[in-house]
Amino acid sequence: HHRRSGFERKPRMKVARFYAPGDVRLEDMDEPTPGADEVKIRVRNCSTCGTDVKIFNNGHPNMTPPQVMGHEIAGEVVEVGSDVSGWSVGDGVQVIAAIPDGTCEECRRGRLTVCTNQTSMGYQYPGGFAEYMIVPRAVLAVDGLNRIPAGLSFAEASVAEPFACVLNGQELAGVGDGDDVVVVGAGPIGCLHVRMARARGAKRVFLIDLNRGRLDMSAGAVHPDAAICGAEVDTIDEVRKLTDGRGVDVVITAAAAGKTQEDGLQMLARGGRLSAFGGLPKDKPNITVDANLVHYRELTIVGANGSSPDHNKRALAMIASGEVPVNDLITVRLPLERVHDAIDTVAKGAAIKVTIEP
């Protein structure tokens, strides 16, 4: 960049900023300038997820408006701060969404996904629904700027973040060789769970959803061993039939309804694990658990909260190696100007994965 006198305009860029529930504005603002300990990227893909819909509708307690949204980010380096080493202009990069501080007691114990001081892209820092974005020092400090492996598109790399969350959830639930697995919720996350379970050696994977259209769309892409529509059959009954009465080893609930967790417990075989992967609505966080079932059957209920920087790296590697393909799951690509359409498409469940290409 040539030196600018005080009177020259800074270059402008388009962004999508959240102001209040239902109020996300497409705006022009000055392109950001990186500090000495930051990196500036040109955003090539920022994919959308259910959380964006929640933010659009309700805002988020950790987010002070106005704020640029978007947290499934991939792009290329355009400027490197003078104190930053290891990166150069033109490098393809993926950015973590959840940023652990790396120094709290949980982080020191290696539990970065439950860092007590976690911050996030698109919440405390301007996110990826923008033409350019600053990768903050906090991300670089925990090695959260990841090189995109050769041969991987920006769009595929942007899906590494939700995929990293899926990897974390399946590790915690111990999905492994020979397991029968139920995935509840046929959205993009459910699709990734089906593929991840297969990659981890699951014997059979069953996909459940209430919405027949969404179930068929996703089942057509990821081919579960059975696709079960909760609006048409008794899912517990169906799962028991499919497993000769034994039940499954793991149930992963990728749906925001407590009933899926309650039903999931009834589907588990002895020694089974229920992954409470999807969060529940704030006003309805409670479920009823038959603790004797948990006791006598030696069941485990396990949570999952986001992903670590390392999960993101491993997700990128798994996508790049072809172990878990994601390209065919990206069914809608839209320019930044159509961010409202993107959020609407996600809300309606009319696509598997929607990505924004600023």
Image: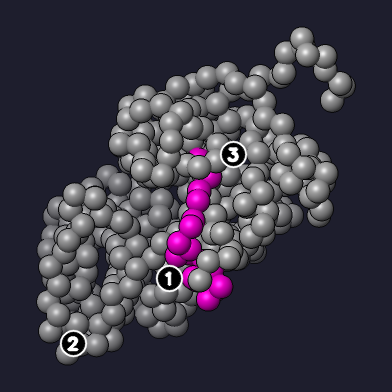
CB atoms of marks 1 and 3 within 8 Å:
no
Could you tell me which residue is drawn at 63 percent across and 56 percent down?
A: 144
Q: Which residues make up the magenta segment?
A: 106-122
Q: Which comes sooner in the sequence, label 2 or label 1?
A: 1
Local crowd at mark 2 within 10 Å, few (<14), some, or many (≥20)? few
CB atoms of marks 2 and 1 within 8 Å:
no
Could you tell me which residue is drawn at 48 percent across and 63 percent down?
A: 115
User: To which residue does mark 2 refer?
Assistant: 295
Residue 65 visible from this viewpoint: yes
Local crowd at mark 1 within 10 Å, few (<14), some, or many (≥20)? many
- Name the spot of residue 110 as percent of width and height, x first: 54, 74
In this view, the residue farthest toward the top is 7
Could you tell me which residue is drawn at 82 percent across and 17 percent down?
A: 4
What kind of residue is marked 3?
A: Asn
Q: How is the image coloured?
A: one colour
User: Where is 212 relative to 237, above or below?
Assistant: above
What kind of residue is marked 2?
A: His
User: To which residue does mark 3 refer?
Assistant: 45
Q: Is 114 part of what is drawn in magenta?
A: yes
- Name the spot of residue 302 as percent of width and height, x first: 33, 73
Quadrant position of the N terminus in the picture: top right
User: To which residue does mark 1 refer?
Assistant: 170
